[in-house]
Amino acid sequence: MVEVASAPATTDDYVGLVPPFNATKPKFTAMLRALADPMADLQAFFEGMPQAFDVDTAIGAQLDVVGLWVGWSRYVKVPIPGLYFTWDSDTLGWDKGLWKGPYDSDTGVTRLDDDTFRVFIKAKIRANSWDGTMQSAVSIINDIATTEQQSVFGVFDNQDGSMTITITGQYPTTLFVALIDQGYFPLKPEGIRINWAITSAQSAPLFGFDIENDFISGFDVGAWAITPDYFLNGFDNTASANSSRGHLILLQVL
C-alpha cells in the first residue's frame, strides 16, 4: 500500500497561528475559518487520493480506474452462468458460490466484485512487468494462490511448448475457475500453451506415478485431474480420488 505523508493542516491549525490580539476577535476568526475551511478540506481530499486509488484499498469506481491503468476490465467477455450460491455443493457452497444481488443478471455473472477484480488486477500488474522466467511465474501464481483459501498451485514446464498449472488442495472458487476458463489469467508466455489441471477431490493432490508431494501423489491418495471446463460443466460433488470418469490430464513432471 502507498505510504502517505502526515496529515495536512486543519482549519484549527491555521486559526491557531493567529496572534493573541486578533484571536480574541470573534468576527476575525470566523472570517478566517470561512476562508480556511475549503482549503483544509481540499488538502484532506488530495491526501486521500493515493489510498483511494491504491490497488489494495480502492473500491468501486476507483478500482475500475486502476483496472483501466493496467489494461483490465471489470466486465467479463461472456456472461458466466451457474455461479450463484446453492446448498449441498462443494463448488458453490459457503465461500465458493456468489450471492446474487438485486440487480444481478439471471443469466450469469457479467461484472466482477471488487475482491475478485482486485486479484486479477494484481496478476495483470505482475504480468505487465514479468521477465518471462519460470521462477517469476511461480512467484506470481503463488501471490494469486493466497486469495484462493488453501488451494495449492503448481507450475510444470512440459518442455514441448506448453506449461501446466495445477490446482490442488481445497477447490478454488467457481468464479475463479470460470475466469481462467475464459482466458482471463494474464500470465501466458507468447507461443506457449497453458494447460490447467484441477483436482477432482477436495483437499487431494493429483494422481501421478513415481512422485509424492503437495501437487502429485499415487494410488489411494491422488485424484484425477480435470479441466476447468469439466469442473464447471460436467463435475459433480461425488467425484473422488478413485473416480473412474474421464478427463484425466497426464502431467510430465521434470
Image: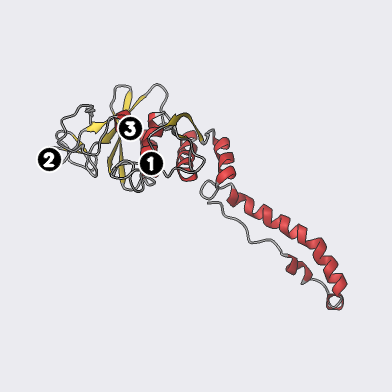
* C-alpha distance separating marks 3 and 1: 27 Å
Which of these two is toward me, 240 or 249?
240
Could you say which is closer to the camera, residue 51 or residue 244? 244
Residues 150 and 240: in front is 240
- Mark seen at residue 232: 3
Q: CA distance from mark 2 to mark 3?
A: 25 Å
Dot 1 surroundings within 10 Å: few (below 14), some, or many (20 or more)?
A: few
Amino acid at circle 2: Asp
Quadrant hosting residue 33: bottom right
The image quarter in which residue 63 lies: top right
Depth order, front residue of 179/12: 179
Q: Give residue 36's position: percent from left, percent from top.
A: 79, 62
Of badges 2 and 3, the one in the foreground is 3
In the image, taking residue 190 as reference, residue 223 lies left or right, namely left
| Residues at marks 2 and 1, CA–CA distance in whole angstroms | 31 Å
Q: Quadrant of residue 83?
A: top left
The residue labelled by disc 1 is: 139
N-term-proximal mark, 3 vs 1: 1
